[in-house]
């Protein structure tokens, strides 16, 4: 039994190392002192991290991505709450069809979404608008918010709500003091997961972004297509560390089991 346990631990450790190796290599390469991507490197340097701070286009695209992800995830969560409550509380004709339609962006390849939005914006003359770029991200990340809010709404104990109503509480009071606190884990997890998805989105955004609405992933894609300097590895390392921090926050606030598998 102990031998099997040891072999199991070694296997899982090797498997995790295999999965994390590309990320570890990117972080290690970001400390190179050379002017090109090199591994292994002869020395360590913070040269390319200083270059990140000195490149104004990086900071501009970073702030745009941060604002875009924040607004899009907030809008997506606000839309997901009434949709989730309607789907979990009412049985109406076409309910499963509505649910599948709301989740459909998960089943459509990002390339198809990007080409479709590009064609639509060109016909409607809406290209270059930050507002419409935000709306595309809302459509893309909405299923992530809805999935987690649905999980919280499905597991919500409605007897608490009914007790509040029987004691004379109004609809607004019940909604603000009972329902929202009960589904708060889904709201928090849905917002964080949607934020990460929106911030890191490239495949769809590269079709609809313009020179004035270039997000950080799009800038990174354009940069790596033109040069081979390690600047991109430093930016990637920062994003990797930031994503890990957000996942830790998500685990502390909600629990990754609820976020990833919807466990109640």
Image (cartoon, rainbow, N blue to C red):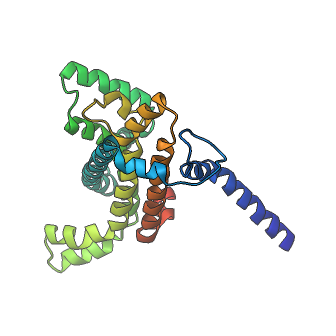
Report the residue at 81% width, 68% height from top: 6
Q: Residue furthest top?
A: 123
Q: Quadrant of the N terminus?
A: bottom right
Give the x, y percent position of residue 60: 28, 44
Q: Left or right? Give the position of 263 relative to 8.
A: left
Give the x, y percent position of residue 9: 75, 65
Q: Is residue 185 above or below residue 230?
A: below
Give the x, y percent position of residue 35: 53, 40
Q: Left or right? Give the position of 10 relative to 169.
A: right
- The answer to whether residue 203 is visible is no
Report the residue at 36% width, 24% height from top: 115
Front residue of 120/33: it is 33
Q: Left or right? Give the position of 213 relative to 196.
A: left
Front residue of 21/247: it is 21
Q: Residue furthest bottom?
A: 167
Give the x, y percent position of residue 225: 47, 29
Front residue of 75/158: it is 75
Looking at the image, how many numbered discs can be counted on the residues? Answer: 0
Can you tell which quarter of the image residue 149 is in? bottom left
Q: Left or right? Give the position of 184 relative to 20.
A: left
Report the residue at 45% width, 32% height from top: 109
Can you tell which quarter of the image residue 175 is in? bottom left
Report the residue at 40% width, 51% height from top: 196
Can you tell which quarter of the image residue 10 is in? bottom right
- The answer to whether residue 242 is visible is yes
């Amino acid at each position: 039994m102990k031998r099997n346990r040891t072999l199991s631990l070694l296997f899982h450790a090797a498997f995790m190392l295999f999965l994390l190796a590309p990320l570890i290599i990117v972080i290690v390469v970001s400390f190179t002192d050379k002017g090109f991507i090199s591994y292994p490197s002869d020395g360590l340097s913070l040269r390319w991290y200083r270059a990140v701070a000195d490149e104004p286009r990086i900071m501009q695209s970073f702030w745009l991505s941060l604002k875009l992800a924040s607004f899009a995830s907030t809008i997506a969560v606000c839309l997901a709450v009434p949709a989730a409550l309607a789907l979990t509380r009412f049985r109406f004709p076409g309910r499963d069809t509505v649910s599948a339609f709301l989740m459909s962006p998960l089943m459509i390849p990002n390339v198809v979404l990007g080409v479709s939005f590009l064609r639509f914006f060109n016909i409607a003359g809406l290209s270059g608008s930050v507002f419409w770029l935000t709306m595309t991200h809302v459509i893309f990340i909405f299923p992530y918010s809805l999935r987690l809010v649905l999980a919280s709404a499905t597991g919500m104990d409605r007897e608490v709500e009914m007790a509040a109503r029987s004691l004379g509480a109004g609809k607004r009071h019940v909604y603000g003091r009972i329902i929202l606190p009960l589904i708060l884990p889904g709201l928090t997890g849905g917002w964080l997961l949607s934020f990460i998805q929106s911030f890191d989105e490239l495949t769809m955004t590269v079709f609809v972004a313009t020179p004035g609405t270039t997000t950080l992933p799009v800038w990174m894609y354009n940069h790596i297509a033109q040069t081979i300097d390690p600047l991109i590895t430093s930016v990637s390392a920062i994003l990797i560390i930031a994503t890990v921090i957000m996942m830790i926050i998500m685990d502390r606030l909600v629990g990754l089991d609820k976020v990833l598998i919807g466990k109640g």
